[in-house]
Image (cartoon, rainbow, N blue to C red):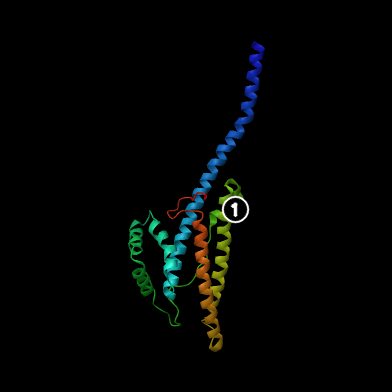
Amino acid sequence: METFKDFLLLVFGWGLGTVSPLIERFFVRRRRRNELLAGLAYECNELRFTLANALVTSNASLGTLDQPTLALLRPIFLEYSDVLNREATQITKQVFSKPDQELIRGLIAANAKRDAFGRPLGKYPMPYSLPLLDSHIGELDLLPLFQQRTLLRIEAELRLFNEQVSYTRELNARTYTLTGENHVLNASNLAGAEKNLGTRTELLIKAINRFIEKDGAIREPDN
């Protein structure tokens, strides 16, 4: 009987020794996944808010800000919270709580100034990045498949956005050197590039929306 008990204890000890590393890896992996998701959610939320600011300023200065764009951007401004600048957050929420048409007219009027070349002031597109996503792209297998796909889509949309930024900046720079028909042609190309940049910005924001909620919380998969 004692021999049998000793055998059971031996088997139990062996089994526990085998399973313990697996259990430890499971909890380490889960903790790492949660940390990665929290960091990516924060990074994407900050980028989305920056993009929303750039898009509303750009469209308002071009006079093309409309209700569909406002419907996309308004929840971002109303739900975003800057813990380091609560006063600015409250002012932003007050502004974007106004009725659609009043808000659109006000934003267009506020961005109506032009430079010597007739271009809107302060409307120079900037490239953006997601450093955390870039540096941990090889760890996405920690995440569920739907989140992997969503983040890879964000990465692809950001790359396309930055390519459009580069092209738009190139055309913008040419306005200082070209004259005559070439200047007119470049202006036409620039207008098209700015419109396409707006589209790319919206697509990037929508890609981020599939990863996080309006308040920055991680979105659950659609059932």
Residue found farthest to the top = 1
Residue under numbered circle 1: 137
Whether residue 16 can be seen here = yes
Image coordinates of residue 125 in percent, x first then y, are: 49, 70
Image coordinates of residue 149 in percent, x first then y, are: 58, 54
Pick the residue in front: 148 or 113. Answer: 148
Query: Which residue is located at x 57 percent, y 47 percent?
Result: 144
Q: Quadrant of residue 97?
A: bottom left
Q: Quadrant of the N terminus?
A: top right
Residue found farthest to the bottom = 180
Whether residue 174 can be seen here = no
Pick the residue in front: 207 or 166. Answer: 207
Image coordinates of residue 118 in percent, x first then y, are: 44, 82
In the displayed structure, does residue 165 sit left or right of residue 214?
A: right
Secondary element at image label 1: helix
Residue found farthest to the front = 223
On screen, residue 182 above or below 97 = below
Which amino acid lies under the numbered mark 1 shown in the image of this protein? Ile
Q: Quadrant of residue 103?
A: bottom left
Q: Badge 1, how many Cα within 10 Å: few under 14, some, many 20+?
A: some
Query: Which residue is located at x 42 percent, y 66 percent?
Result: 70
Pick the residue in front: 30 or 96. Answer: 96
On screen, residue 145 above or below 85 = above
Q: Quadrant of residue 114?
A: bottom left
Query: Which residue is located at x 55 percent, y 88 percent?
Result: 181
Image coordinates of residue 157 in percent, x first then y, are: 56, 62
Q: How many marks?
A: 1
Query: Which residue is located at x 64 percent, y 29 percent?
Result: 18
